């Protein structure tokens, strides 16, 4: 196998991506499909699911609901197994001081960002053991840096990194690899809302808040959803076969938040 061939995922991989109808999840789904994978996604956005590229199957599912995850894995049976699972579902959570965040907002952020990843990993692990496959958990640079006014989000993402490293040790002897991808500031509607909310909290204009964010990135630029998809493909290719237990930042080097 040449080095170039080692960077190409095997044709016909069976791939599940949560929250795969928009943003980073959609970019990952399209990338795997283009690489010849059979792709199934779940999402709560029915309109986006209806607009998925032909050939990507889907389930309407909220990972914070046990019954939805059960239904998702009933549908995944049609793939005949799983080689790659991308735990992508997550929410931004509230932007507020810790004394202002109510219990429901905190609990919902943790339930989707962390407990949702548990629910999917819990159901996917037997299938990944069969295929000696790969679990990719989406965390964030907020999983390695402090993030004022975004404590539930940061706490959940630090926990995802811990979940990833623990599962890599647990499942490695059975041939299953587990890694986390830590996106930085990813261009798109979601980060625009985060910047807007933080600007209001800080009493800054949107442009000032955006510039402050970029000034904390050594390359002074946002990353694209396709950058995250490229990392997922690499981890799924033969060249990534000895990468496990890693928290891989794709962020243009975010130095602080």
Image (cartoon, helix red, strand yellow):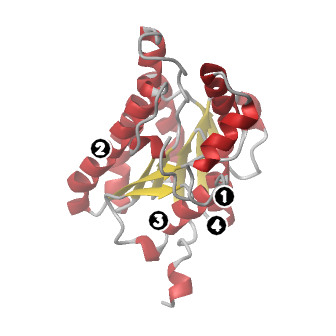
In the image, taking residue 41 as reference, residue 56 lies left or right, namely right
Which residue is under mark 3? 235
Which residue is under mark 2? 162
Task: Measure the alpha-carbon separation of dots 1 and 4.
Answer: 17 Å
Task: Measure the alpha-carbon separation of dots 2 and 1.
Answer: 25 Å
Q: Residue at x 73, y 31 (%)?
A: 206
- Secondary structure beneath label 4: loop
Which residue is under mark 4? 36
- Secondary structure beneath label 1: helix
User: Sequence-wise, which precedes: disc 2 or disc 3?
Assistant: 2
Task: Measure the alpha-carbon separation of dots 3 and 1.
Answer: 14 Å
What is the x, y in percent for residue 23?
Answer: 67, 43
What is the x, y in percent for residue 251?
Answer: 55, 55
User: Sequence-wise, which precedes: disc 4 or disc 3?
Assistant: 4
Q: Is residue 108 above or below residue 125?
A: above
User: Sequence-wise, which precedes: disc 1 or disc 4?
Assistant: 4
Q: How crowded is mark 2: few (under 14 residues within 10 Å), some or many (20 or more)?
A: some
Which residue is under mark 1? 226
């Amino acid at each position: 196998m040449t080095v170039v061939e080692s960077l190409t995922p095997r044709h016909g991989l069976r791939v599940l991506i949560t929250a795969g109808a928009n943003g980073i999840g959609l970019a990952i789904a399209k990338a795997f499909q283009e690489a010849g994978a059979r792709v199934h996604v779940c999402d709560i956005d029915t309109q986006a699911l209806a607009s998925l590229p032909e050939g990507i199957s889907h389930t309407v599912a909220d990972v914070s609901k046990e019954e939805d995850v059960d239904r998702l894995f009933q549908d995944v049976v049609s793939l005949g197994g799983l080689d790659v699972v991308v735990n992508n579902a997550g929410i931004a959570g509230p932007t507020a001081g810790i004394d202002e965040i109510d219990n429901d907002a905190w609990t919902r952020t943790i339930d989707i960002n962390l407990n949702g990843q548990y629910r999917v990993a819990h159901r996917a692990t037997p299938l990944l053991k069969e295929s000696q496959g790969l679990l990719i958990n989406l965390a964030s640079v907020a999983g390695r840096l402090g993030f004022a006014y975004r404590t539930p989000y940061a706490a959940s993402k630090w926990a995802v990194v811990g979940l990833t490293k623990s599962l890599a040790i647990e499942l490695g002897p059975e041939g299953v690899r587990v890694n986390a991808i830590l996106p930085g500031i990813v261009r798109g509607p979601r980060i625009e809302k985060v910047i807007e909310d933080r600007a209001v909290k800080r009493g800054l204009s949107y442009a000032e808040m955006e510039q402050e964010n970029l000034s904390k990135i050594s390359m002074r630029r946002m990353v694209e959803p396709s950058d995250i998809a490229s990392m997922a493909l690499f981890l799924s290719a033969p060249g990534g076969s000895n990468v496990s237990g890693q928290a891989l930042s794709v962020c243009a080097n975010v130095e602080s938040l």
